[in-house]
Amino acid sequence: MNQMPSTATSEWKKVADFGTYHHSTHRGSEKIREKVNILFTEVFGDLPFARDDKLKILDVGCGLGFLSCLCAEYYPKAKITGIDTFEHASLKGPSLTKAKNNAKILEFSERIRFQKGDVFSSGYSKEKYDLFVSNLVFHNLGRRRINAYEILAHWMTPKSYLVLGDLFFDYKTDFRRLTSHFGNVEKVNRFNIGVQYKILVLSDPKK
C-alpha cells in the first residue's frame, strides 16, 4: 500500500499554517490532520490510479489547502483545484490568500489553483475531474448536504472517484441518500478520528 512518509505532516507544520478547527486547539488540529494524512493516503493507495498519473483533482471546501497539498504530494503530476467560500464554520480565519501562501511555501503553486466557489456553483462539471476529495465540509451544510451529494454525482464521470471524509451525525440517512446517487459507496474501516467521523469512497455516479 502506498503511503507518504510519516514525516510529511510534521515537516509541513513547521513552515505552513493550515489553521485551527473550531472547538479545537492548534495542537489538537494538527493531531487531526496527522490522522487525516494517514487515512487519505491509505485510501489513495487503494484507488485505481498510479501515483504518477496526470490526474485532475477537485478539493471541495479546501480551507487553507491542507488536503489539496496532500493530493499534490501524493500525486506529483496531478493538477489540483481547491474551491471554498472561505467563510465556512469548520476553520477559524479561512482565507484564499493564506491557502495560496501555503501552496507557495510547500512549492505546489504550479499545480494547485485555489478559487472562491462551492459545490452549488456551476461550471465545475465541465472540467471532467478524475478525483474529488473533501474533508470536514459537508456536515456544515445541514440539510443542503443532500443536494450537494447529488450535484457531485452529476459532476463526476463514470471513471471518477470521490473520497469524502466528514462527520456523519445521521449516517443511516446519509448512506441511504448516497446510495441513491452512487452505485458504489464504501466505508473505509481504519482507526477512528471520532465517533461520527468516517471516510467514504464513492464511485459509479448515477446520472
Image (cartoon, grey):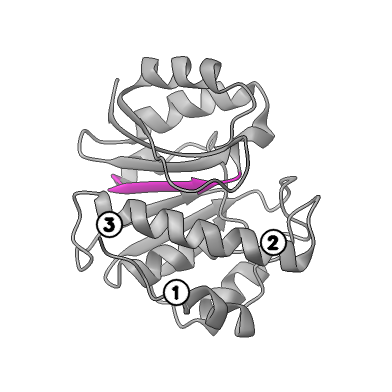
Give the structural element (helix, strand or loop) at label 3.
helix
Q: Earlier in the sequence, mark 1 or mark 3?
A: 1
Q: Position of residue 30 (x, y in %)?
A: 65, 66
Q: Residue at x 69, y 61 (%)?
A: 29
Identified by mark 1, the residue type is Ser
Q: Position of residue 201 (x, y in %)?
A: 36, 38
Q: Nearer the viewer, residue 181 or 5?
A: 5
Q: Nearer the viewer, residue 174 or 7?
A: 7
Give the structural element (helix, strand or loop) at label 1.
loop
Residue 65 can be seen, yes or no: no
Identified by mark 3, the residue type is Gly
Q: Which corner quadrant holds the C terminus?
A: top left
Task: State the extent of the magenta-drawn residues as a range.
Answer: 128-136
Q: Which corner quadrant holds the N terminus?
A: bottom left
Cα distance, mark 2 to mark 1?
17 Å
Cα distance, mark 1 to mark 3?
15 Å
Judged left or right of residue 40, residue 52 is left
Cα distance, mark 2 to mark 3?
24 Å
Q: Which residue is mark 1?
A: 6
- Identify whether 198 is placed above or below 78: above
Task: Determine if the magenta segment contains residue 170.
Answer: no
Q: Position of residue 91 (x, y in %)?
A: 72, 54
Task: Determine if the magenta segment contains residue 132.
Answer: yes
Q: Which residue is mark 3?
A: 45
Judged left or right of residue 182, residue 101 is right
Q: Which mark is residue 29?
A: 2
Q: Give the mark toward the camera: 2 or 1.
A: 1
Q: Give the mark toward the camera: 1 or 3.
A: 1
Q: Earlier in the sequence, mark 2 or mark 1?
A: 1
